[in-house]
Image (tube, coloured by chain):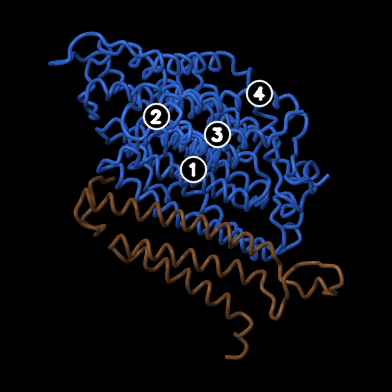
Chain colours: A brown, B blue
């Protein structure tokens, strides 16, 4: 299994994405679906981070008197992207949970199979 | 020269000030969105002459592309931002009297955020920035759908949120894959490097990004959320969702496919997907008895026509697609705004409940009829030249596939005509059995102004399509001309 070690982060990231999709598609409890969305988000974030990851890399800061090769620095752009994506994910999560509370107030259940006020 | 960044900064800043102004005086918040959007209309109009010469590129932070986020106000961007601001302005005016319940200042703040997100998607030249504005658009529309907090609104909003979030995650995954391959997020920079790589490695990000943007654009298999969301939202919100949001989703798909990837083989697939969307949308609309659901399904059908026009991928076809995007946006906004008052007045969302409404709300019924005729594509309304342009472009392609597709598109138009004419007949030629409220209903001024303006616009552009067709064709050539876009941005 040694040959996989270079790709371990990618495998983990896509594993999380697939687990999240699986939960979203198959679970009927709304809270579980929201958890699935969160796992999917986490997988995407992990993927973005691993794009810019460098084993034993340093922070990309140039300072006087410190000699660091640019090639040994971690790519900062994916980290900025992930920071933004985490904030967006957190706000979607908050909105989803507050809607869940409202929905429970209206229907008295969180089972999406029972919440079918509208149909195609 | 006006910096296009103002188009985003002003409404975004004001959106966060709106809730604070409520503490000064509860009346103030509702006047802020019209001011901000009027500013956007004026600035976009000022940018038009400059942008049609060559795209106005504005880099944030003073770094030259590809190192910073940049805004590209080319003909497409300026056209869409003017369009978004115009529809937004009319809807904001309409909301003065229409929105009476709930926390009004939050409604106006969210409306401004929504329109800022849409403008941002239209103007940005950076794929991650595209994602961020896309999320601003999506999150504010989830909350606006649930604004009334009623049973159907909250349910529709939850469904929309689940599907929209999965779509956004796919979009982000696609962006990550692109960044991993090219080490840049700038659209022009990616576009200039993408030719050098093999097609398999860009196929997955392409599919992921089309899927992600297609959820918002309501392309055929991804549109399950739309009928619920558009029919449960307040009518003013349905108007912007239907007129602006899905159009922006389609624009996103077009920008990614045409400019970033330059993926020719996808175009035919797009045309076929567009046709499927037309048929599914129109057939489902035909069997509805709820007026707002019917309009929502008709939006799906119209989006299919736009995608079809873009999928033709000749200058005439893309011009027709963009023209159709504008004419659908104006007509559908008019339909939702008039239906809002008709439902308010009759208390029923069923088509049968709207019998003889022309005697109760003559202006709204007249507006509905004009909007419906324009959507179907009757002359002299704006829908006629736009549909004609798409059909002519498809015929000029002279391929058997496109001839067959055009036949089906025309079939879709026939179905569309039959259900819209049925409603107009119900409005005008059926008598109202028992009207407990009785009498003649005058629209408030805030409802009258947007409806009349939309009617006038539909007729004027329908009679003189030349007013915008030059600008539209320069927009189409911007979408199709990848090398021109790359040199304009990268210098």
Q: Quadrant of the N terminus of chain B?
A: top right
Q: Name the residue under label 4.
A: B45
Determine if residue B326 is in view: yes
In three-dimensional space, the C-alpha distance between marks 2 and 4, rounded to whole angstroms, equals: 24 Å
Q: Which of marks 1 and 3 is nearer the N terminus?
A: 3
Q: Earlier in the sequence, mark 4 or mark 1?
A: 4
The number of discs equals 4
Find residue B14 and name its label: 3
Q: Where is residue B330 in the image (x, y as percent from the top left)?
A: 48, 25
Q: Is mark 3 on a helix, strand or loop?
A: helix
Q: In which quarter of the image is residue B422?
A: top left
Residues packed near mark 4 inside 10 Å, few (<14), some (14 to 19) or many (20 plus): some
Q: Which of marks 3 and 2 is nearer the N terminus?
A: 3
Q: Nearer the viewer, residue B183 or B108?
A: B108
Position of B167 with respect to B157 (left or right) is right
Q: Which of marks 2 and 1 is nearer the N terminus?
A: 2
Q: Which chain carries label 2?
A: B
In three-dimensional space, the C-alpha distance between marks 1 and 3, rounded to whole angstroms, equals: 37 Å
- Between label 4 and label 1, give the one nearer the viewer: 4
Residues packed near mark 3 inside 10 Å, few (<14), some (14 to 19) or many (20 plus): many
Q: Name the residue under label 1.
A: B274
Q: Quadrant of the C terminus of chain B?
A: top right
Q: Which of B356 and B279 is in front in this view?
A: B356
Q: Which of B32 and B144 is in front in this view?
A: B32
Q: Name the residue under label 2.
A: B236
Q: Which chain carries label 3?
A: B
Q: Which chain carries label 1?
A: B
């Amino acid at each position: 299994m040694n040959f996989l070690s270079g790709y371990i982060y990618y495998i983990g990231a896509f594993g999380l994405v697939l687990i999240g999709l699986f939960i979203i598609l198959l679970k009927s409890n709304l809270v579980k679906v929201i958890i699935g969305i969160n796992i999917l988000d986490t997988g995407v974030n992990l993927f973005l981070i691993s794009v810019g990851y460098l084993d034993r890399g340093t922070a990309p800061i140039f300072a006087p008197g410190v000699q660091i090769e640019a090639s040994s620095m971690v790519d900062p752009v994916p980290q900025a992207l992930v920071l933004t994506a985490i904030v967006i994910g957190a706000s979607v999560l908050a909105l989803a949970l507050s809607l869940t509370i409202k929905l429970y107030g209206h229907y008295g259940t969180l089972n999406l199979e029972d919440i079918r006020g509208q149909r195609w | 020269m006006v910096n296009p960044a103002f188009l985003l900064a002003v409404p975004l800043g004001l959106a966060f000030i709106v809730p604070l102004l409520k503490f000064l005086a509860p009346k103030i918040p509702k006047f802020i969105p019209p001011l901000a959007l009027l500013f956007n209309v004026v600035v976009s109009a000022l940018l038009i002459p400059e942008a049609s010469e060559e795209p106005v590129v504005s880099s944030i932070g003073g770094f030259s592309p590809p190192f910073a986020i940049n805004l590209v106000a080319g003909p497409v961007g300026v056209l869409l931002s003017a369009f978004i601001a115009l529809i937004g302005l009319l809807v904001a005016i309409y909301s003065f009297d229409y929105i009476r319940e709930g926390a009004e200042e939050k409604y106006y703040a969210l409306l401004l955020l929504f329109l800022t997100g849409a403008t941002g998607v239209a103007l940005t030249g950076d794929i991650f920035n595209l994602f961020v504005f896309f999320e601003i658009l999506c999150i504010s529309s989830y909350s606006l759908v649930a604004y009334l907090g009623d049973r159907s609104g909250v349910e529709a909003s939850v469904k929309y949120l689940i599907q929209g979030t999965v779509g956004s995650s796919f979009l982000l995954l696609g962006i990550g894959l692109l960044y991993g391959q090219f080490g840049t997020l700038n659209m022009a920079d990616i576009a200039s490097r993408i030719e050098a790589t093999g097609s398999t490695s860009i196929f997955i990000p392409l599919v992921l990004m089309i899927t992600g943007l297609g959820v918002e654009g309501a392309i055929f298999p991804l549109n399950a959320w739309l009928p619920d969301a558009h029919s449960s939202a307040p009518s003013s919100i349905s108007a912007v969702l239907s007129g602006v949001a899905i159009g922006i989703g389609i624009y996103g798909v077009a920008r990614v496919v045409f400019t970033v990837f330059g993926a020719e083989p996808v175009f035919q697939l797009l045309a076929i997907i567009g046709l499927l969307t037309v048929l599914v949308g129109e057939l489902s609309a035909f069997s509805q008895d709820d007026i707002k659901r019917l309009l929502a399904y008709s939006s799906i059908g119209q989006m299919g026509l736009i995608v079809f026009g873009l999928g033709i991928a000749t200058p005439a076809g893309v011009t027709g697609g963009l023209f159709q995007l504008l004419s659908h946006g104006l007509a559908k906004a008019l339909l939702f705004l008039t239906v809002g008052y008709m439902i308010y007045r009759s208390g029923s969302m069923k088509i049968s409940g709207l019998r003889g409404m022309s005697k109760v709300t003559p202006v709204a019924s007249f507006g509905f009829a004009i909007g419906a005729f324009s959507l179907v594509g009757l002359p002299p309304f704006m829908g006629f030249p736009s549909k004609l342009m798409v059909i002519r472009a498809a015929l000029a392609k002279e391929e058997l596939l496109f001839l067959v597709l055009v036949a089906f598109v025309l079939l879709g138009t026939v179905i569309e005509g039959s259900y819209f004419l049925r409603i107009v007949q119900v409005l005008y030629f059926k008598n109202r059995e028992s009207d407990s409220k009785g009498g003649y209903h005058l629209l408030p001024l805030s409802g009258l102004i947007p409806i009349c303006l939309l009617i006038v616009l539909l007729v004027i552009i329908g009679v003189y399509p030349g007013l915008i067709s030059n600008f539209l064709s320069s927009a189409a050539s911007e979408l199709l001309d990848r090398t021109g876009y790359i040199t304009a941005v990268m210098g």
